[in-house]
Amino acid sequence: MRYLTAGESHGPQLTAIIEGVPSGLPITAETINNDLGRRQKGYGRGRRMQIEKDQVQILGGVRHGKSLGSPISLVVENRDWKHWTKIMGAEEISLEDEQEVKRQISRPRPGHADLNGAIKYGHRDMRNVLERSSARETTVRVAVGAVAKSLLSELGIKVVGHVIEIGGIRSENTNYNDIDHLLQVSEASPVRCFDKCVEMKMIEAIDSAKENGDSIGGIVEVVVEGMPAGVGSYVHYDRKLDSKIAAAIVSINAFKGVEFGIGFEAGRKLGSEVHDEILWSKEQGYTRKTNRLGGFEGGMTTGMPLIIRGVMKPIPTLYKPLQSVDIETKEPFSASIERSDSCAVPAASIVAESVVAWEIANALVEQFGVDRMDLIKENVEKMRAYTREF
Ligand SMILES: Cc1cc2nc3c(=O)[nH]c(=O)nc-3n(C[C@H](O)[C@H](O)[C@H](O)COP(=O)(O)O)c2cc1C
Ligand SMILES: C=C(O[C@@H]1CC(C(=O)O)=C[C@@H](OP(=O)(O)O)[C@H]1O)C(=O)O
Protein backbone atom coordinates (compact mmCIF):
# COMPACT_ATOMS: atom_id res chain seq x y z
CA MET A 1 0.00 0.00 0.00
CA ARG A 2 1.10 3.59 -0.41
CA TYR A 3 -0.34 7.05 0.09
CA LEU A 4 0.24 10.68 -0.73
CA THR A 5 -1.07 13.77 0.99
CA ALA A 6 -1.61 17.30 -0.33
CA GLY A 7 -2.82 20.61 1.03
CA GLU A 8 -1.62 23.70 2.86
CA SER A 9 -2.24 24.52 6.51
CA HIS A 10 -4.43 27.53 5.67
CA GLY A 11 -5.65 26.30 2.30
CA PRO A 12 -9.14 24.94 1.63
CA GLN A 13 -8.48 21.32 2.52
CA LEU A 14 -6.12 18.42 3.10
CA THR A 15 -6.31 15.39 0.86
CA ALA A 16 -4.95 11.85 1.06
CA ILE A 17 -5.06 9.18 -1.62
CA ILE A 18 -4.36 5.64 -0.44
CA GLU A 19 -3.59 2.96 -2.98
CA GLY A 20 -3.50 -0.80 -2.51
CA VAL A 21 -5.98 -1.20 0.37
CA PRO A 22 -7.47 -4.70 0.05
CA SER A 23 -11.16 -5.00 -0.82
CA GLY A 24 -13.80 -5.78 1.77
CA LEU A 25 -12.27 -3.71 4.60
CA PRO A 26 -14.89 -1.88 6.69
CA ILE A 27 -14.15 1.88 6.53
CA THR A 28 -16.46 4.48 8.01
CA ALA A 29 -16.22 8.23 8.42
CA GLU A 30 -17.21 7.73 12.04
CA THR A 31 -14.13 5.63 12.86
CA ILE A 32 -11.83 8.07 11.08
CA ASN A 33 -13.49 11.09 12.75
CA ASN A 34 -12.97 9.51 16.13
CA ASP A 35 -9.20 9.51 15.60
CA LEU A 36 -9.26 13.00 14.07
CA GLY A 37 -10.96 14.20 17.25
CA ARG A 38 -8.40 12.45 19.44
CA ARG A 39 -5.58 14.25 17.60
CA GLN A 40 -7.22 17.61 18.23
CA LYS A 41 -7.37 17.14 21.98
CA GLY A 42 -4.51 17.52 24.40
CA TYR A 43 -3.37 20.18 26.84
CA GLY A 44 -1.09 22.90 25.44
CA ARG A 45 -2.59 23.44 22.00
CA GLY A 46 -3.06 26.93 20.55
CA ARG A 47 -6.23 28.66 19.33
CA ARG A 48 -6.35 26.88 15.98
CA MET A 49 -7.79 23.76 17.57
CA GLN A 50 -10.82 25.75 18.72
CA ILE A 51 -11.51 26.77 15.13
CA GLU A 52 -11.12 23.36 13.50
CA LYS A 53 -13.46 20.43 14.00
CA ASP A 54 -11.84 17.88 11.75
CA GLN A 55 -14.29 15.71 9.82
CA VAL A 56 -13.36 13.40 6.95
CA GLN A 57 -15.12 13.07 3.63
CA ILE A 58 -14.58 9.72 1.95
CA LEU A 59 -14.70 10.62 -1.73
CA GLY A 60 -13.54 7.44 -3.46
CA GLY A 61 -12.74 3.77 -3.04
CA VAL A 62 -15.47 2.91 -0.52
CA ARG A 63 -19.04 1.74 -1.15
CA HIS A 64 -21.61 0.76 1.49
CA GLY A 65 -18.93 1.09 4.17
CA LYS A 66 -16.40 -1.28 2.60
CA SER A 67 -13.25 -0.75 0.54
CA LEU A 68 -13.49 -1.65 -3.15
CA GLY A 69 -9.79 -2.29 -3.77
CA SER A 70 -9.59 0.96 -5.75
CA PRO A 71 -7.73 4.07 -4.49
CA ILE A 72 -9.33 5.64 -1.43
CA SER A 73 -9.67 9.38 -1.42
CA LEU A 74 -9.98 11.22 1.90
CA VAL A 75 -10.56 14.94 2.40
CA VAL A 76 -10.57 17.08 5.53
CA GLU A 77 -11.61 20.71 5.11
CA ASN A 78 -9.82 23.53 6.95
CA ARG A 79 -12.47 25.60 8.70
CA ASP A 80 -9.87 28.35 9.21
CA TRP A 81 -9.58 28.70 5.40
CA LYS A 82 -12.35 31.30 5.26
CA HIS A 83 -10.14 33.68 7.29
CA TRP A 84 -7.16 33.17 4.98
CA THR A 85 -8.53 33.46 1.43
CA LYS A 86 -6.85 36.84 0.88
CA ILE A 87 -3.51 35.89 2.42
CA MET A 88 -3.49 32.61 0.50
CA GLY A 89 -4.15 34.53 -2.74
CA ALA A 90 -7.53 33.00 -3.50
CA GLU A 91 -9.47 36.29 -3.32
CA GLU A 92 -9.07 39.74 -4.86
CA ILE A 93 -7.57 42.24 -2.42
CA SER A 94 -8.36 45.91 -2.08
CA LEU A 95 -5.60 48.51 -2.07
CA GLU A 96 -6.08 49.08 1.69
CA ASP A 97 -5.62 45.39 2.35
CA GLU A 98 -2.62 45.03 0.11
CA GLN A 99 0.11 45.88 2.59
CA GLU A 100 -1.20 43.57 5.28
CA VAL A 101 -2.01 40.68 2.95
CA LYS A 102 1.26 40.77 1.06
CA ARG A 103 3.34 41.12 4.22
CA GLN A 104 6.09 38.60 3.72
CA ILE A 105 7.49 36.37 6.44
CA SER A 106 11.18 37.20 6.28
CA ARG A 107 12.49 36.41 9.79
CA PRO A 108 12.89 32.63 9.96
CA ARG A 109 12.06 30.79 13.19
CA PRO A 110 14.98 28.72 14.50
CA GLY A 111 13.87 25.08 14.60
CA HIS A 112 11.15 25.40 11.95
CA ALA A 113 11.55 24.67 8.24
CA ASP A 114 11.43 28.40 7.29
CA LEU A 115 15.00 29.22 6.34
CA ASN A 116 16.11 25.95 4.77
CA GLY A 117 12.82 25.60 2.90
CA ALA A 118 13.13 29.15 1.57
CA ILE A 119 16.73 28.54 0.42
CA LYS A 120 15.80 25.24 -1.20
CA TYR A 121 12.70 26.41 -3.11
CA GLY A 122 13.78 30.01 -3.67
CA HIS A 123 10.92 31.58 -1.70
CA ARG A 124 11.45 35.10 -0.36
CA ASP A 125 8.15 34.81 1.54
CA MET A 126 8.55 32.02 4.06
CA ARG A 127 4.78 31.57 4.31
CA ASN A 128 5.27 29.48 1.16
CA VAL A 129 7.32 27.09 3.30
CA LEU A 130 5.37 27.08 6.56
CA GLU A 131 2.06 26.37 4.85
CA ARG A 132 3.25 22.88 3.99
CA SER A 133 5.85 22.25 6.68
CA SER A 134 3.11 22.80 9.29
CA ALA A 135 1.97 19.78 11.24
CA ARG A 136 -1.54 20.53 9.99
CA GLU A 137 -0.66 17.83 7.45
CA THR A 138 -0.68 15.24 10.24
CA THR A 139 -4.49 15.52 10.20
CA VAL A 140 -4.76 13.42 7.06
CA ARG A 141 -1.95 11.12 8.18
CA VAL A 142 -4.18 10.31 11.14
CA ALA A 143 -7.08 9.71 8.74
CA VAL A 144 -4.88 7.28 6.79
CA GLY A 145 -3.80 5.68 10.07
CA ALA A 146 -7.44 5.15 11.01
CA VAL A 147 -7.90 3.13 7.81
CA ALA A 148 -4.80 1.10 8.74
CA LYS A 149 -6.20 0.59 12.24
CA SER A 150 -9.46 -0.75 10.76
CA LEU A 151 -7.38 -3.30 8.85
CA LEU A 152 -5.44 -4.24 11.98
CA SER A 153 -8.61 -4.56 14.01
CA GLU A 154 -9.90 -7.15 11.50
CA LEU A 155 -6.76 -9.15 12.35
CA GLY A 156 -7.14 -8.71 16.13
CA ILE A 157 -4.24 -6.24 16.39
CA LYS A 158 -4.51 -3.16 18.63
CA VAL A 159 -2.37 -0.01 18.60
CA VAL A 160 -2.30 2.68 21.29
CA GLY A 161 -0.27 5.88 21.49
CA HIS A 162 0.18 7.70 24.78
CA VAL A 163 2.52 10.17 26.50
CA ILE A 164 5.26 9.09 28.88
CA GLU A 165 7.23 12.30 29.35
CA ILE A 166 6.72 16.08 29.05
CA GLY A 167 9.49 18.57 29.78
CA GLY A 168 11.54 16.02 31.74
CA ILE A 169 8.58 14.86 33.86
CA ARG A 170 8.50 11.13 33.34
CA SER A 171 5.79 8.57 33.93
CA GLU A 172 7.24 5.40 35.42
CA ASN A 173 3.89 3.66 35.48
CA THR A 174 2.40 2.10 32.36
CA ASN A 175 0.41 -1.02 31.51
CA TYR A 176 1.76 -3.23 28.74
CA ASN A 177 -0.36 -6.19 29.81
CA ASP A 178 -3.74 -4.62 29.24
CA ILE A 179 -3.75 -2.39 26.20
CA ASP A 180 -7.48 -1.62 26.54
CA HIS A 181 -6.89 -0.27 30.03
CA LEU A 182 -3.89 1.72 28.82
CA LEU A 183 -6.10 3.26 26.12
CA GLN A 184 -8.98 3.96 28.45
CA VAL A 185 -6.90 5.74 31.09
CA SER A 186 -4.68 7.74 28.75
CA GLU A 187 -7.74 8.72 26.69
CA ALA A 188 -9.30 10.37 29.75
CA SER A 189 -6.12 12.29 30.59
CA PRO A 190 -5.65 15.88 29.28
CA VAL A 191 -2.01 15.02 28.57
CA ARG A 192 -2.76 11.43 27.39
CA CYS A 193 -0.70 10.03 30.25
CA PHE A 194 -1.53 6.72 31.96
CA ASP A 195 0.19 7.80 35.18
CA LYS A 196 -2.13 10.00 37.27
CA CYS A 197 0.73 10.81 39.67
CA VAL A 198 2.62 12.91 37.14
CA GLU A 199 -0.27 14.31 35.10
CA MET A 200 -0.61 17.50 37.15
CA LYS A 201 3.15 18.14 37.04
CA MET A 202 3.09 17.80 33.26
CA ILE A 203 0.23 20.31 33.04
CA GLU A 204 2.15 22.74 35.28
CA ALA A 205 5.25 22.37 33.11
CA ILE A 206 3.20 23.24 30.01
CA ASP A 207 1.59 26.23 31.77
CA SER A 208 4.94 27.51 32.94
CA ALA A 209 6.51 27.23 29.46
CA LYS A 210 3.52 29.04 27.97
CA GLU A 211 3.56 31.84 30.57
CA ASN A 212 7.23 32.41 29.76
CA GLY A 213 6.56 32.63 26.02
CA ASP A 214 8.38 29.34 25.63
CA SER A 215 7.49 25.82 24.43
CA ILE A 216 8.02 22.28 25.65
CA GLY A 217 8.51 18.78 24.19
CA GLY A 218 8.39 15.22 25.42
CA ILE A 219 8.30 11.52 24.67
CA VAL A 220 5.43 9.44 23.31
CA GLU A 221 5.06 5.68 23.32
CA VAL A 222 3.17 3.40 20.96
CA VAL A 223 2.23 -0.11 22.07
CA VAL A 224 1.02 -2.73 19.59
CA GLU A 225 -0.61 -5.93 20.75
CA GLY A 226 -1.42 -9.03 18.69
CA MET A 227 1.24 -8.93 15.97
CA PRO A 228 2.15 -12.39 14.69
CA ALA A 229 5.84 -13.34 14.86
CA GLY A 230 7.99 -13.06 11.75
CA VAL A 231 6.53 -9.92 10.15
CA GLY A 232 9.19 -7.83 8.42
CA SER A 233 12.43 -9.42 7.26
CA TYR A 234 16.14 -9.76 8.00
CA VAL A 235 17.13 -10.56 4.40
CA HIS A 236 17.54 -7.02 3.13
CA TYR A 237 18.08 -3.62 4.79
CA ASP A 238 14.99 -2.03 3.30
CA ARG A 239 12.67 -4.82 4.46
CA LYS A 240 13.39 -4.46 8.19
CA LEU A 241 10.13 -3.47 9.86
CA ASP A 242 11.77 -1.71 12.83
CA SER A 243 13.69 0.53 10.43
CA LYS A 244 10.50 1.45 8.56
CA ILE A 245 8.81 2.31 11.84
CA ALA A 246 11.83 4.38 12.91
CA ALA A 247 11.61 6.37 9.67
CA ALA A 248 7.87 6.84 10.11
CA ILE A 249 8.29 8.21 13.64
CA VAL A 250 11.04 10.64 12.64
CA SER A 251 8.85 11.77 9.72
CA ILE A 252 6.45 13.33 12.24
CA ASN A 253 7.05 17.07 12.57
CA ALA A 254 9.44 17.85 15.44
CA PHE A 255 10.36 14.19 16.15
CA LYS A 256 14.08 13.72 16.64
CA GLY A 257 14.63 10.15 17.84
CA VAL A 258 13.18 6.67 18.27
CA GLU A 259 13.77 3.75 20.58
CA PHE A 260 12.37 0.24 20.84
CA GLY A 261 11.81 -1.49 24.20
CA ILE A 262 14.47 -0.38 26.67
CA GLY A 263 16.03 1.53 23.77
CA PHE A 264 19.24 3.48 24.42
CA GLU A 265 19.42 1.93 27.88
CA ALA A 266 20.55 -1.30 26.11
CA GLY A 267 23.91 0.33 25.42
CA ARG A 268 24.53 0.57 29.16
CA LYS A 269 23.68 -3.02 30.06
CA LEU A 270 25.15 -6.50 29.61
CA GLY A 271 23.77 -8.95 27.05
CA SER A 272 22.32 -11.10 29.81
CA GLU A 273 20.38 -8.07 31.03
CA VAL A 274 19.02 -7.19 27.61
CA HIS A 275 18.05 -10.25 25.56
CA ASP A 276 14.64 -11.79 26.09
CA GLU A 277 14.75 -15.48 27.05
CA ILE A 278 12.58 -17.81 24.98
CA LEU A 279 9.74 -19.93 26.39
CA TRP A 280 7.22 -22.32 24.81
CA SER A 281 3.85 -23.56 26.04
CA LYS A 282 1.07 -25.52 24.31
CA GLU A 283 -1.48 -22.74 24.83
CA GLN A 284 0.69 -19.78 23.87
CA GLY A 285 3.40 -21.24 21.63
CA TYR A 286 6.62 -19.21 21.79
CA THR A 287 6.78 -16.30 24.23
CA ARG A 288 9.54 -14.36 26.02
CA LYS A 289 10.25 -14.01 29.71
CA THR A 290 10.78 -10.27 29.19
CA ASN A 291 10.23 -7.83 26.34
CA ARG A 292 13.23 -5.52 26.62
CA LEU A 293 13.79 -5.44 22.88
CA GLY A 294 10.27 -4.13 22.35
CA GLY A 295 9.04 -6.93 20.09
CA PHE A 296 11.72 -6.88 17.37
CA GLU A 297 14.66 -9.12 16.49
CA GLY A 298 16.33 -9.12 13.09
CA GLY A 299 13.94 -6.55 11.65
CA MET A 300 11.04 -8.95 12.37
CA THR A 301 8.35 -9.10 15.02
CA THR A 302 8.87 -11.63 17.84
CA GLY A 303 5.16 -11.98 18.63
CA MET A 304 5.58 -9.94 21.82
CA PRO A 305 3.95 -6.48 22.08
CA LEU A 306 5.75 -3.82 20.05
CA ILE A 307 7.00 -0.95 22.22
CA ILE A 308 8.09 2.10 20.27
CA ARG A 309 9.01 5.52 21.66
CA GLY A 310 9.61 8.81 19.92
CA VAL A 311 11.04 12.08 21.23
CA MET A 312 9.46 15.38 20.24
CA LYS A 313 11.53 18.54 20.56
CA PRO A 314 9.83 21.70 21.89
CA ILE A 315 7.70 23.63 19.38
CA PRO A 316 9.91 26.07 17.38
CA THR A 317 7.57 29.09 17.39
CA LEU A 318 8.21 31.03 20.58
CA TYR A 319 6.11 33.96 21.79
CA LYS A 320 9.38 35.26 23.25
CA PRO A 321 11.28 34.66 20.05
CA LEU A 322 14.93 33.71 19.63
CA GLN A 323 17.41 35.64 17.59
CA SER A 324 17.11 35.45 13.82
CA VAL A 325 18.04 37.48 10.74
CA ASP A 326 15.76 39.36 8.37
CA ILE A 327 16.54 37.75 5.03
CA GLU A 328 15.75 41.03 3.20
CA THR A 329 18.00 43.37 5.22
CA LYS A 330 20.36 40.74 6.71
CA GLU A 331 20.02 42.58 10.02
CA PRO A 332 19.55 40.75 13.30
CA PHE A 333 15.90 40.53 14.37
CA SER A 334 13.76 38.41 16.64
CA ALA A 335 12.21 35.47 14.77
CA SER A 336 8.69 35.93 13.46
CA ILE A 337 5.78 34.96 15.71
CA GLU A 338 2.96 32.90 14.27
CA ARG A 339 -0.05 31.60 16.18
CA SER A 340 1.24 28.47 17.84
CA ASP A 341 0.86 25.56 20.23
CA SER A 342 3.02 25.57 23.38
CA CYS A 343 3.00 21.78 23.63
CA ALA A 344 1.69 19.27 21.11
CA VAL A 345 3.08 16.06 22.62
CA PRO A 346 -0.39 14.62 23.49
CA ALA A 347 -1.61 15.30 19.92
CA ALA A 348 1.60 13.87 18.50
CA SER A 349 1.04 10.60 20.38
CA ILE A 350 -2.01 10.05 18.15
CA VAL A 351 0.06 10.86 15.06
CA ALA A 352 2.68 8.34 16.24
CA GLU A 353 -0.04 5.74 16.79
CA SER A 354 -1.28 6.40 13.25
CA VAL A 355 2.07 6.17 11.46
CA VAL A 356 2.96 2.97 13.32
CA ALA A 357 -0.45 1.51 12.43
CA TRP A 358 0.21 2.33 8.80
CA GLU A 359 3.67 0.71 8.74
CA ILE A 360 2.54 -2.53 10.35
CA ALA A 361 -0.66 -2.75 8.28
CA ASN A 362 1.46 -2.23 5.19
CA ALA A 363 3.92 -4.93 6.26
CA LEU A 364 1.06 -7.38 6.86
CA VAL A 365 -0.54 -6.69 3.48
CA GLU A 366 2.85 -7.10 1.82
CA GLN A 367 3.56 -10.39 3.59
CA PHE A 368 0.12 -12.01 3.57
CA GLY A 369 -0.81 -10.02 0.56
CA VAL A 370 -3.70 -10.76 -1.56
CA ASP A 371 -6.17 -8.19 -2.73
CA ARG A 372 -8.98 -9.27 -0.43
CA MET A 373 -9.41 -8.75 3.29
CA ASP A 374 -11.06 -12.15 3.86
CA LEU A 375 -8.06 -13.98 2.38
CA ILE A 376 -5.56 -11.86 4.33
CA LYS A 377 -7.43 -12.82 7.50
CA GLU A 378 -7.23 -16.51 6.59
CA ASN A 379 -3.50 -16.25 5.85
CA VAL A 380 -2.73 -14.47 9.12
CA GLU A 381 -4.70 -17.08 11.07
CA LYS A 382 -2.81 -19.89 9.29
CA MET A 383 0.49 -18.18 10.15
CA ARG A 384 -0.53 -17.90 13.82
CA ALA A 385 -1.49 -21.61 13.98
CA TYR A 386 1.73 -22.63 12.20
CA THR A 387 3.84 -20.54 14.60
CA ARG A 388 2.24 -22.15 17.68
CA GLU A 389 3.17 -25.61 16.36
CA PHE A 390 6.58 -24.69 14.93
C1 LIG B 1 0.80 17.91 16.32
C2 LIG B 1 1.89 18.91 16.09
C3 LIG B 1 1.63 20.27 16.27
C4 LIG B 1 2.63 21.20 16.07
N1 LIG B 1 2.34 22.52 16.28
C5 LIG B 1 3.30 23.46 16.08
C6 LIG B 1 3.02 24.84 16.30
O1 LIG B 1 1.91 25.22 16.68
N2 LIG B 1 4.01 25.73 16.06
C7 LIG B 1 5.25 25.34 15.64
O2 LIG B 1 6.12 26.18 15.45
N3 LIG B 1 5.55 24.04 15.43
C8 LIG B 1 4.59 23.09 15.63
N4 LIG B 1 4.90 21.76 15.41
C9 LIG B 1 6.26 21.39 15.01
C10 LIG B 1 6.64 21.86 13.62
O3 LIG B 1 5.67 21.47 12.67
C11 LIG B 1 8.01 21.29 13.22
O4 LIG B 1 8.95 21.59 14.21
C12 LIG B 1 8.47 21.88 11.88
O5 LIG B 1 7.66 21.33 10.84
C13 LIG B 1 9.95 21.63 11.53
O6 LIG B 1 10.21 20.27 11.36
P1 LIG B 1 11.23 19.45 12.31
O7 LIG B 1 11.00 19.97 13.69
O8 LIG B 1 10.80 18.02 12.16
O9 LIG B 1 12.61 19.71 11.86
C14 LIG B 1 3.92 20.79 15.64
C15 LIG B 1 4.18 19.43 15.45
C16 LIG B 1 3.19 18.49 15.69
C17 LIG B 1 3.48 17.04 15.50
C1 LIG C 1 -3.14 23.25 12.51
C2 LIG C 1 -2.53 22.36 13.26
O1 LIG C 1 -1.34 22.57 13.91
C3 LIG C 1 -0.58 23.68 13.54
C4 LIG C 1 0.84 23.22 13.40
C5 LIG C 1 1.76 24.33 13.24
C6 LIG C 1 3.13 24.01 12.79
O2 LIG C 1 3.90 24.96 12.55
O3 LIG C 1 3.47 22.82 12.67
C7 LIG C 1 1.42 25.63 13.58
C8 LIG C 1 0.06 26.01 14.06
O4 LIG C 1 -0.70 26.49 12.98
P1 LIG C 1 -1.58 27.83 13.08
O5 LIG C 1 -0.59 28.96 13.04
O6 LIG C 1 -2.50 27.82 11.91
O7 LIG C 1 -2.33 27.78 14.37
C9 LIG C 1 -0.67 24.78 14.61
O8 LIG C 1 -2.00 25.11 14.91
C10 LIG C 1 -3.07 21.03 13.51
O9 LIG C 1 -2.40 20.26 14.20
O10 LIG C 1 -4.17 20.72 12.98
Image: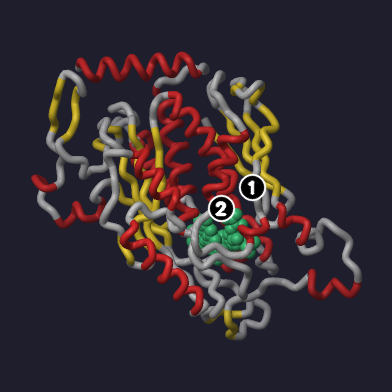
Q: Is mark 2 within 8 Å of ligand 2?
A: yes
Q: Is residue 56 left or right of residue 94?
A: left
Label 1: few (<14), some (14–19) or many (≥20) C-alpha neighbours in 10 Å: many
Where's residue 381, x and y in %? 35, 17
Q: Is residue 34 above or below residue 191?
A: above
Q: Residue at x 59, y 44 (%)?
A: 140
Q: Residue at x 70, y 32 (%)?
A: 59
Q: Is mark 1 within 8 Å of ligand 2?
A: yes
Where's residue 272, x and y in %? 8, 45
Q: Residue at x 63, y 30 (%)?
A: 72
Where's residue 302, x and y in %? 25, 32
Q: How many marks?
A: 2
Q: Is residue 365 left or right of residue 5?
A: left
Asked if the residue at tag 1 contacts the one at tag 2, i.e. Cβ–Cβ closer than 8 Å, the answer is yes
Q: Which mark is residue 40?
A: 2
Residue carrying label 1:
54
Q: Amino acid at mark 2?
A: Gln
Which corner quadrant of the image does residue 88 belong to? bottom right
Q: Is residue 57 left or right of residue 258?
A: right
Where's residue 361, x and y in %? 44, 31
Q: Residue at x 56, y 41 (%)?
A: 34
The residue lying toward the viewer, choosing from 189 and 91, is: 189
Q: Amino acid at mark 1?
A: Asp
Q: Which mark is residue 322?
A: none
Q: Provide the secondary structure element on which disc 2 rests.
A: helix
